[in-house]
Image: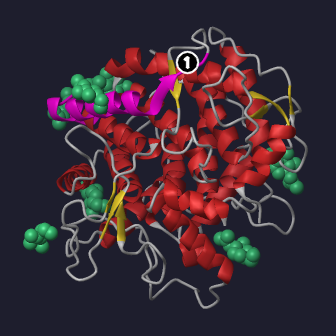
Amino acid sequence: MRLPWVAATLGVLARSAAAIELDLNSEDSIKDAASTIAFGLVRYYTGNYTGDTPGNLPDPYFWWEAGAMFGALVDYWALTGDDSYNAITQQALTHQGTEKGDFMPTNQTRTLGNDDQGFWGMAAMSAAENNFPNPPPDQPQWLALAQSLFNQWASRWEEETCGGGLRWQIFTFNNGFNYKNSISNGCFFNIAARLARYTGNQTYADWATRIWNWEESIGLITPEYAVRDGIGIEPLTGECNGTKTMDFNQWTYNAGIFLHGAAVMYNLTNGSAEWRARVDGLLNTTTATFFTPHEDPSVGNIVMFEQLCEPSGFCNIDQRSFKGYLTRWLAGTATVAPHTVPLIRPLLEADARAAARACSGSVPEPEFKGHPGTACGFRWTTSAGFDGMVGVGEQMNALSAVMYTLAAKPGAPEPLTADTGGTSKGNYAAQGRTMETGIGYADITVRDRVAAGFLTSAIGLGVVAGCAFVMM
Ligand SMILES: *[C@@H]1O[C@H](CO)[C@@H](O)[C@H](O)[C@H]1NC(C)=O
Ligand SMILES: *[C@@H]1O[C@H](CO)[C@@H](O)[C@H](O)[C@H]1NC(C)=O
Ligand SMILES: *[C@@H]1O[C@H](CO)[C@@H](O)[C@H](O)[C@H]1NC(C)=O
Ligand SMILES: *[C@@H]1O[C@H](CO)[C@@H](O)[C@H](O)[C@H]1NC(C)=O
Ligand SMILES: *[C@@H]1O[C@H](CO)[C@@H](O)[C@H](O)[C@H]1NC(C)=O
Ligand SMILES: *[C@@H]1O[C@H](CO)[C@@H](O)[C@H](O)[C@H]1NC(C)=O
Ligand SMILES: *[C@@H]1O[C@H](CO)[C@@H](O)[C@H](O)[C@H]1NC(C)=O
């Protein structure tokens, strides 16, 4: 199994060459840069090879990150028109959507969390919103996949513990079952808001409001709009009482997922003051927390960084992909809440310039299989550019930084709805399998335990535990 520092060590030895050219005034330049970075990203994927499983990334990348990658590739096609990866994307989404249409593949149940499903679900939602080519009619459809997840999450909502909220894990036997976290509830919130917008069905909007209210009431979203990672259920009382069991850590993706969902709700309510205050508050906190000066001011005043682990260099594989999602959701926010464009656009432009500059690595295979001199590093803050860290996360972050500059501007296409040309077929009754009906977990291996424990320590308990794992 490859650990993060292996790639990092190799990378440091690697030569750094000219960065990817990027002229933000030229759409063609942006598309060319995005195409080069996307090529390097997709070269990590082997799921379409004979004998491999469509939708899976090889070790050390977990299932959810593949879902995130295909979400980025849906948007890549929508923004650039380049359909080079549509076939693998459609194949991956339908295969992992499974014949039941529930993003609950039996192979994943040993570590399946609500958030893992969520990243695949958000890819399906983007596919619906962009009229990504629909699958054959006998296969699960994009909108129905998102609705199935909504229904699954609504059925897992649990008032008995902590007055509501989704647990992180779905199955009792997985580490993290006693943890209610912002990313799981954020996935539910984000998809509920977008389903409300897409379908016009008020039930979805009501759920989005309910999820938001719970996050606030339990203190996971603070009055200052900090989004905490999660809270543990007290074993004796079943409560989430105060901050005793709270993980206070702030990650880019938690802020981003609520920001985008709140922006959709703001739009849906025709610009209500309530949702506007939430959008503006989250955006303000996001800017203050997750952006830092670039060493070279000509790149931009501030650029995004993963403040908890990036300065120390101890972000784990998962965490090394989070900045890409905040980037995606900042662009999504700008699209449905146009008053934020003047704030968001300069951030995205600075990130794009900084990320393109960081895409100058030449790293030997198998650590990177894209074009030499275009491997993207992790840090966007340094004058030096490429920092030697490579992987799916780094590549996906940089792709996002570059391509979403095509979205966050006046006149960019709006996400579709059922009323404005969206063609994906839905199914309000779509369900998921339950503990009893759908899982094969007899053969839990040591690797699975390590995987589940890894996620617990890395995301649940924060950087300290994550570092300990890296050291092991
Ligand atoms: C898998 O997909 C990639 C990207 O579209 C393509 O370049 C490659 O040839 C495909 N491989 C196989 C074995 O089909
Ligand atoms: C589950 O694993 C088997 C064996 O590797 C594979 O053939 C199948 O395609 C996988 N299913 C999914 C949905 O990933
Ligand atoms: C919450 O915790 C406080 C202090 O630990 C305790 O006094 C209080 O009774 C608890 N509340 C509930 C509802 O259990
Ligand atoms: C928003 O505006 C539309 C069109 O004017 C209207 O149909 C809808 O009821 C409004 N929604 C709210 C929540 O005010
Ligand atoms: C913006 O965020 C900063 C840092 O979190 C906070 O101090 C400030 O009060 C916020 N401003 C507004 C207008 O919310
Ligand atoms: C809602 O989003 C559309 C773009 O999708 C935009 O034209 C409209 O101004 C937004 N409404 C508000 C209140 O910002
Ligand atoms: C709205 O969505 C809910 C939740 O899925 C569903 O039960 C209901 O039938 C939908 N309403 C309409 C009018 O389609």
* Residue 411 point in image, percent of width and height: 46, 16
Magenta: main secondary structure: helix
Please indicate whether residue 162 sits to the left or right of residue 14 in the image: left
Residue 175 is a magenta residue: no
Residue 287 is a magenta residue: yes
* Residue 22 point in image, percent of width and height: 71, 16
Please indicate whether residue 229 sits to the left or right of residue 219 in the image: right
Does residue 171 lie above or below 31 as drawn?
Answer: below
Does residue 277 lie above or below 353 as drawn?
Answer: below
Colour convention of the picture = secondary structure
Q: In the image, which residues are magenta?
A: 267-295
Amino acid tagged 1: Glu
Q: Foreground: 130 or 180?
A: 180
Please tell me in which quadrant of the rendered image residue 198 appears: top left
Disc 1 beta carbon < 8 A from ligand 6? Answer: no
Q: Residue furthest bottom?
A: 442
* Residue 82 point in image, percent of width and height: 72, 32
Q: Foreground: 158 or 460?
A: 460
Residue 415 visible in this rendered orientation of the protein? no
Q: Quadrant of the N terminus?
A: bottom right
SS label for mark 1: helix
Task: Say which residue label 1 marks.
Answer: 349
Please tell me in which quadrant of the rendered image residue 279 appears: top left
Q: Residue at x 73, y 52 (%)?
A: 5
Please tell me in which quadrant of the rendered image residue 99 appears: bottom right
* Residue 49 point in image, percent of width and height: 85, 60
Q: Residue at x 76, y 16 (%)?
A: 21
Q: Foreground: 265 or 183?
A: 183
Q: Residue at x 60, y 41 (%)?
A: 72
Label 1: how many Cα within 10 Å (few below 14, some 14–19, many 20+) = many
